[in-house]
Image (cartoon, coloured by chain):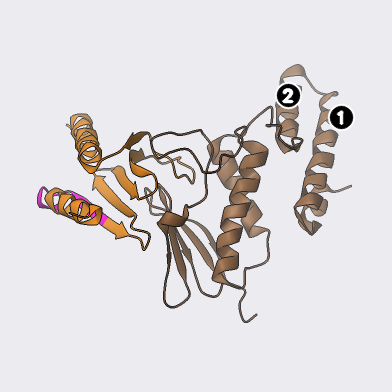
Chain colours: A orange, B brown
Amino acid sequence: MAVSDDVAHFAGELRAAGTATEVTTFPSGAVMLDVRRGDHLYVLAYSPSTGFGVDEVLDGDGIGTSYRFGFPDFESAKAKVLSLLTEADGHLA
Amino acid sequence: MVYADLAVKAKNVEELELAAEAFAKAIIAFSGSVGASKAFKLKRSAKALQCPAPGEVPRVPLTIRERLAEYYNRLRGQPPAKTADEALERVRNTLDEVEDLHSGVPKRNPPPPLGQSDGRMHPPLDDFVTRNPNGSITARTRGHHIEIGSDGSITIKNLKTGDIEFQQPGGAGK
């Protein structure tokens, strides 16, 4: 399965659970998944040349292309997004 | 001498840097006549304005917020781009200029891998750029969406807040 399909499928799962998502694909094969939960915005980025990155976007963030968490595979990146969402849910509760 | 006038009238980056350097020297000279605390703050501002020598990192880096403000100021200070490619090049080069001067972190090419942050702002990577059939270009960074019109217009949106942080009309046809 192509990475874009993996990401689209993951986005669908999140939407089904009531989380807003947006998937953007690029001609290079790169994919960006935006995940919004409450006031939080998380991103999962994939680039064919650099792999997967996951991070939360904060209010004061500058313009950047780096992510706190990097992964070589989709499943690890997906797990990180889910753990960040769980963490956010803990803060929201 | 009105240093702001020098900065506004600067025709290129070199002239702007000279204006900043002159302003910095004036601040340092003035700081000798005020209290120690105020003098420290003035000197800190002055050092931030001074241009490091090639290969040297600034001694007092600005914060991300200050650098972002400086970035938008520099973009705003340039005449509108006339093509989308010119605008994209400007978006990238101007950010690199600001970060070279004020981040305290030397540029790495390629930038750090996705899972590493060096504290420096980096312009959009080619992988995350889309050239549209109508001549416009869209680019994405971690938290910003950059929309560049075929006429050279530039719009930078903060995806967390939804705010349009920078907007400049294009110069094509003017």
| Total numbered circles | 2
* Label located before the other in sequence (2 or 1): 1
From what the image shows, is residue B1 above or below residue B55? below
Residue at the disc numbered 2: B38
- Comparing B25 with A1, the one in front is A1
Residue A10 image position (x, y, % from top left) = 17, 49
Q: Amino acid at mark 2?
A: Lys
Q: Is residue B157 visible?
A: no
Residue A36 image position (x, y, % from top left) = 25, 47
Q: Residues within 10 Å of mark 1 (few under 14, many from 20)?
A: few
- The quarter of the picture where residue A74 lies is top left
- The quarter of the picture where residue B18 lies is top right
Q: Quadrant of the C terminus of chain A?
A: top left
Magenta residues (range): A15-22
From what the image shows, is residue B59 above or below residue A53? above
Outermost residue to the bottom? B173
Judge from the rendering whether residue B24 lies leftward or rightward of residue A71; answer left or right.
right
Chain assignment, label 1:
B
Residue at the disc numbered 1: B29
Q: Quadrant of the N terminus of chain A?
A: bottom left
SS of the residue at dot 1?
A: helix
Q: Amino acid at mark 1?
A: Ala
- Comparing A75 with B72, the one in front is A75
Closer to the eye: label 2 or 1: 1
Residue A20 is a magenta residue: yes
Residue drawn at point x = 54 percent, y = 69 percent: B84
Judge from the rendering whether residue A39 lies leftward or rightward of residue B103; answer left or right.
left
Judge from the rendering whether residue A24 lies leftward or rightward of residue B73; answer left or right.
left
